């Protein structure tokens, strides 16, 4: 996929089609009926995985979802096992549910009613050659109301198949790791049966999960669904979730005769995922599996496959089952998920799989950084309400007092946010947050100062008053015969007038900023000193008046 003029080339669909014109700008797409797959993780010529940050930002940073909890539904598994084919049914179901006039209400109709419509969306095809590389996301998130007070953004994610002849085991493990670490619903696509080696693939993430549980009581992963395709033993375990759960219980059963490693994997699966389930799917039919012309038309599906497809997809994606991604006990928003992707791609950039401890540290780092960003945004929002662009000038002492109160509130909020790594790990991030808030206050203080009418007219007014005083005083002194003193005052007034003219020209032309700043500083110091003297004089005058009042009051009483 190439990037040009902020446009993303669209991936080909089966039969050489495409989901849209390649000249369509992503930003113009706002309807979930539109959209196309966007490659967010690319495979370089050196077989390294590279995150396409602009492509990911175009999805996660859009205004509609940047601050909304995200539900990433990802599918992973061996190559050429129908992952993209199945994911397009997820896409079809979600589109059908949000195709009405009110796109906020999820009301899926008979999403498989058109038997002659080809299956479109993520690129897929039959055969034995790889079709998907890297990691792809659907460009259009689906905003769904899951409860009266909660709305989530559902994002579909496709991954390249694992364990083929072109990529190493480490490459396959990296893709599976990124998928599991970032998704909240992970569909593990398997063929025929749930084998022991399928469980072993999860072990590296389960060890990460065990370490994560030591720093936070929340389970690190949300939902894992084993999707067993082409299940051939319905007489032992029936198709669907019921048979799948029974098979899963049997496979995860702990036996004393098992080696310790196998027992450990089974315990960790239960401990690290909030929900683990399994679905047994029948074979889709001979035409689906063998016909080169098959393009995903429902009429070509085996009736039993179609029956259970209608059960699996709605159950997986109905609003009550959509669980947002959580890290450290808090839902992850679109813009926060972007930071996690950046951190994870760096962790997996080496030549070998990272240690679970390294993965945990990376997650804790991103977790604390997102907490800092959240509190900083909270501070900015409150300060904008206090002294933002539309607010009037307020006393600097009042502003500083508000800042101190707000800063303490923000730091308390930061401390209250559950964070991975514990309080000791968060100390440096808390200090960094304090520095950011102090720097932000300097900006707001300067912005508030610029609103002060004295900041605009104060310096010219002081220079003009000084000039006027010098000329008037000189004239008066000249009348009493002190000509030399009068000439000196007139000269000072003339210089002051020249400074005023130069200041006005420099101020409003933008030239000589150093000279203008120096004159502003001197004028402000003169104003402050004179203001202090005037204030002291008024205080003294008030005290003298109060003493005189008391004396006169006592004299009147004594006369009586």
Image (spheres, rainbow, N blue to C red):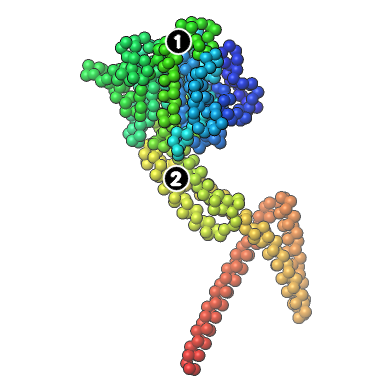
Q: Earlier in the sequence, mark 2 or mark 1?
A: 1
Residue 194 rendering spot, x and y as whole percentages: 35, 15
- Place residue 237 in its image quadrant: top left
Q: In this view, does 559 lie to the left or right of 31?
A: left
Against 499, residue 553 (above or below) is: below
Identify the secondary structure beneath mark 2: helix
Q: Name the residue under label 1.
A: 302
Is residue 409 positioned above or below 364 on the image? below
Look at 71% across and 50% down and name the residue there. 510
In the foreground, 362 or 143: 143
**Horizontal and vertical percent for residue 245?**
33, 20
The image shows residue 266, relative to residue 69, as above or below, that is above
Nearer the viewer's eye, disc 2 or disc 1?
Answer: 1
In the displayed orientation, state which residue is furthest to the bottom.
559
Question: Residue 431 got which mark?
Answer: 2
Residue at the spot 73% in from the left edge and 57% down from the top edge: 504
Residue at screen point 48% across, 41% down? 374
Is the residue marked by circle 2 packed among few (<14), some (14-19), or many (20+) residues within 10 Å? Answer: few
Q: Extreme left residue here?
A: 256
The answer to whether residue 521 is seen in the rendering is no
* Image quadrant occupied by the N terminus: top right
User: Percent from the top left, x then y, of residue 253?
Assistant: 27, 20
């Amino acid at each position: 996929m190439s990037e040009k003029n902020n446009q993303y080339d669209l991936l080909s669909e089966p039969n050489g089609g495409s989901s849209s014109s390649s000249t369509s700008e992503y930003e113009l797409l706002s309807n979930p009926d539109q959209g196309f797959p966007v490659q967010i993780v690319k495979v370089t010529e050196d077989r390294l995985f590279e995150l396409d940050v602009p492509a990911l930002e175009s999805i996660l940073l859009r205004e509609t979802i940047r601050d909304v909890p995200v539900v990433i539904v990802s599918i992973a598994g061996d190559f050429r096992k129908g992952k993209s084919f199945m994911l397009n049914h997820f896409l079809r179901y979600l589109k059908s549910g949000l195709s009405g006039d009110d796109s906020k209400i999820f009301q899926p109709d008979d999403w498989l009613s058109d038997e002659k419509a080809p299956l479109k969306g993520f690129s897929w095809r039959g055969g034995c050659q790889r079709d998907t590389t890297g990691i792809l996301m659907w460009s259009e998130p689906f905003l769904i109301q899951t409860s009266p007070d909660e709305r989530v953004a559902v994002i579909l994610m496709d991954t390249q198949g694992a364990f083929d002849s072109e990529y190493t085991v480490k490459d396959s493990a990296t893709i599976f790791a990124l998928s599991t670490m970032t998704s909240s619903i992970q569909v593990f696509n398997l063929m025929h049966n749930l084998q022991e080696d399928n469980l072993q693939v999860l072990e590296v993430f389960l060890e990460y999960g065990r370490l994560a549980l030591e720093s936070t009581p929340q389970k690190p992963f949300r939902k894992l669904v084993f999707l067993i395709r082409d299940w051939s033993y319905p007489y032992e375990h029936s198709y669907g979730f019921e048979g799948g759960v029974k098979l899963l219980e049997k496979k995860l059963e702990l036996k004393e005769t098992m080696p310790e490693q196998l027992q450990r994997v089974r315990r960790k699966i239960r401990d690290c995922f909030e929900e683990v389930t399994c679905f047994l799917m029948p074979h889709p039919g001979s035409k689906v599996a063998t016909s080169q012309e098959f393009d995903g038309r429902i009429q070509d599906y085996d009736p039993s496959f179609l029956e259970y497809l209608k059960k699996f997809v709605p159950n997986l994606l109905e609003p009550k089952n959509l669980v947002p991604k959580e890290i450290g006990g808090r839902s992850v928003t679109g813009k926060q998920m972007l930071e996690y992707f950046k951190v994870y791609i760096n962790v997996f950039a080496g030549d070998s799989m990272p240690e679970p401890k390294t993965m945990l540290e990376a997650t804790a780092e991103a977790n604390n950084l997102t907490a800092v960003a959240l509190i900083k945004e909270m501070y900015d929002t409150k300060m904008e309400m206090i002294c933002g662009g539309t607010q009037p000038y307020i006393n600097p002492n009042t502003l500083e007092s508000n800042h101190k109160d707000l800063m303490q509130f923000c730091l308390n909020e930061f401390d209250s946010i559950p964070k991975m790594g514990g309080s000791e790990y968060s100390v440096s991030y808390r200090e960094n947050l304090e520095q950011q808030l102090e720097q932000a206050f300097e900006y707001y203080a300067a912005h508030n100062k610029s609103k002060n009418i004295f900041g605009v007219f104060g310096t010219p007014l002081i220079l003009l008053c000084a000039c006027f005083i010098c000329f008037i005083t000189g004239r008066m002194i000249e009348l009493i015969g002190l000509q030399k003193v009068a000439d000196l005052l007139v000269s000072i007034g003339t210089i002051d007038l020249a400074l005023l003219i130069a200041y006005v020209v420099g101020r409003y032309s933008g030239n000589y900023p150093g000279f203008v700043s120096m004159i502003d500083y001197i004028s402000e110091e003169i104003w402050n000193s004179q203001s202090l003297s005037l204030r002291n004089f008024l205080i003294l005058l008030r005290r003298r008046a109060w003493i005189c009042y008391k004396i006169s009051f006592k004299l009147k009483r004594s006369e009586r």
